[in-house]
């Protein structure tokens, strides 16, 4: 496909220059001496160009998107309509409380809904993503210990954790203590006990963890942590697996972030925007960022009166548009949120059982909303790596799953179908994965050189990351 500059044919689509415009009042140094070189095409050609470009995008509207841990579920379009309502969209962030009661009410009710779902006592809607929520949560934990005069330096993190966990804790000045998972992919209690001392501020856990497995010993872990005076941080990226069945409070957590852009069906990918609210227990409420949205029985207001607040973590009040979409989703689903989790788990187990005969399954257990295969067999027997399998999936109009994460699985292929896909779609995907496994045996070369049908074929991933070439060279 040609760039719009190459397509330029000198046709005036729209003329921006007015020959007769008097620009004498401008300083001559500000005036252009030559043409800027914008492409020139008729309106219809411009439209077709951008339509063709947009057709090349892969999105959930176009095909299956089983990106493990990222939860690429269907985002109801009515949410977009609601978020773009004029009274929401045109609201000024500096409006007085009295002039934005509706928006504040929505935020307050979303906070209440998240409290119900997580079992926590207070919420900030400010953080704009999961990682931002982690940072906020770790700042709260740090301030909690500082206020008690009990300076603790260490945070324990299992080796299956998402990379943002150690990064967030480190940014807050904590030292990271990594503990190994046991042979069933769970936090190893003995390993935990061996590192637990009075310098440990917290543990960061994801439950179900990034292998899609529920941490069976979570109650024992929270007992050990609390007995040691330490806190528990819940990475809620996988909250979509447990909604309505259990919650972080029942498991003994003190601080929780939720990724509304994963669990609550708001669009993501391509860098956001997202929302990563942080929910805390009563004991940590006085450390929340200011302001949070409060209600005095008559009116909604922004409450800045937070005794040991860590301060603000975001300009204004969070990504409001995302909050509207998430609240709409929660209201629309109601009690069916529980069914969403149930179906996400059912779909994942169904696919896992269909695929485990063809790919290694290092942790062969009943999974939650996702599972992790390994491409080891294909790599060693056929020279076809997980990367090759991912590229081959692109030829089948399927977004590749998350690969090479979690780090504790070699050649990891992390699959999350979500609840919004049908059995037929799952069967279709399984057939494609099985076809690729067979292809690896008889025609590995085809996979090694995949993708064959995409506009851009194999890219040099290192070069693309280190020296991105983003400019048209003319
Ligand atoms: C997505 C994810 C995060 C980070 O969330 P963002 O919203 O992308 O910042 C953290 N932990 C886990 C397990 C995740 O899947």
Image: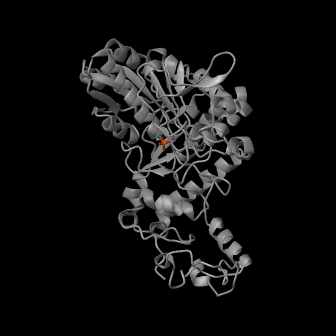
Residue 260 spot, x, y in % from top left: 58, 37
Image mark count: 0
The answer to whether residue 202 is seen in the rendering is yes
Residue 90 spot, x, y in % from top left: 68, 45
Q: Is residue 66 left or right of residue 466?
A: right
The answer to whether residue 181 is seen in the rendering is no
Q: Nearer the viewer, residue 168 or 372?
A: 168
Residue 331 spot, x, y in % from top left: 72, 31
Vertical order, 373 against 196 (above or below): below
Vertical order, 74 against 1 (above or below): above
Query: Residue at position x 62%, y 61% from top?
Result: 397
Quadrant for residue 324, please give it: top right
Query: Residue at position x 28%, y 32% from top?
Result: 174
Vertical order, 46 against 395 (above or below): below
Residue occupying the far top of the picture: 227
Quadrant for residue 12, please give it: bottom right
Q: Is residue 452 left or right of residue 90?
A: left
The chosen color scheme is: one colour
Q: Is residue 439 left or right of residue 150?
A: right
Q: Nearer the viewer, residue 92 or 308?
A: 92
Query: Residue at position x 53%, y 25% from top?
Result: 123
Residue occupying the far bottom of the picture: 10
Q: Is residue 407 left or right of residue 31?
A: left
Residue 246 spot, x, y in % from top left: 56, 21
């Amino acid at each position: 496909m040609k760039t719009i500059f190459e397509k330029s044919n000198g046709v005036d689509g729209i003329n921006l220059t007015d020959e007769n415009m008097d620009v004498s009042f401008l300083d001559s140094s500000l005036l252009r001496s030559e043409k800027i070189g914008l492409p020139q095409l008729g309106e219809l050609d411009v439209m077709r160009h951008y339509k063709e470009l947009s057709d090349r995008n892969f999105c959930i509207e176009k095909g299956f998107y089983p990106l493990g841990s990222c939860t690429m579920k269907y985002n109801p379009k009515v949410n977009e309509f609601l978020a773009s309502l004029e009274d929401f969209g045109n609201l000024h962030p500096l409006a007085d409380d009295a002039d934005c009661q509706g928006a504040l009410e929505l935020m307050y009710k979303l906070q209440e809904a998240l409290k119900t779902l997580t079992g926590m006592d207070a919420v900030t809607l400010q953080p704009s993503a999961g990682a931002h929520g982690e940072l906020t949560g770790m700042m709260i934990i740090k301030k909690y210990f500082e206020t008690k005069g009990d300076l603790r330096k260490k945070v324990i993190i299992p080796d299956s954790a998402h990379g943002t966990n150690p990064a967030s804790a480190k940014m807050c000045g904590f030292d990271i203590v990594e503990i190994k998972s046991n042979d069933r992919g769970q936090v190893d209690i003995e390993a935990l006990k061996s590192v637990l001392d009075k310098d440990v501020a917290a543990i960061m856990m994801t439950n179900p963890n990034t292998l899609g497995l529920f941490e069976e010993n979570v109650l024992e872990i929270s007992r050990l942590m609390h007995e040691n005076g330490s806190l528990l941080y819940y990475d809620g990226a996988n909250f979509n697996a447990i909604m309505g069945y259990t919650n972080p409070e029942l498991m003994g957590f003190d601080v929780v972030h939720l990724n509304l852009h994963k669990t609550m069906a708001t669009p993501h990918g391509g860098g956001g925007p997202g929302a990563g609210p942080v929910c805390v227990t009563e004991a940590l409420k006085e450390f929340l960022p200011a302001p949070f949205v409060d209600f005095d029985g008559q009116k909604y207001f922004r409450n800045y009166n937070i005794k040991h607040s860590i301060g603000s973590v975001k300009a204004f009040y969070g990504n409001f548009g995302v909050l509207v979409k998430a609240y709409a989703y929660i209201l629309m689903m109601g009690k069916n949120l529980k069914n969403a989790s149930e179906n996400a788990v059912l779909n994942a187990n169904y696919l896992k059982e269909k695929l485990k005969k063809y790919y290694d399954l290092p942790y062969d257990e009943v999974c939650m909303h996702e599972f992790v295969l390994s491409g080891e067999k294909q790599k060693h027997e056929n020279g076809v790596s997980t990367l090759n399998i991912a590229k081959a999936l692109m030829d089948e109009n399927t977004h590749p799953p998350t690969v090479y994460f979690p780090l504790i699985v070699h050649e990891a292929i992390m699959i999350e179908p979500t609840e919004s896909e049908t059995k037929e779609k799952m069967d279709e995907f399984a057939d494609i994965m099985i076809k690729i496994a067979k292809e690896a045996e008889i025609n590995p070369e085809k996979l090694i050189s995949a993708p064959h049908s995409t506009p851009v074929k194999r890219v040099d991933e290192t070069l693309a990351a280190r020296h991105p070439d983003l400019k048209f060279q003319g």
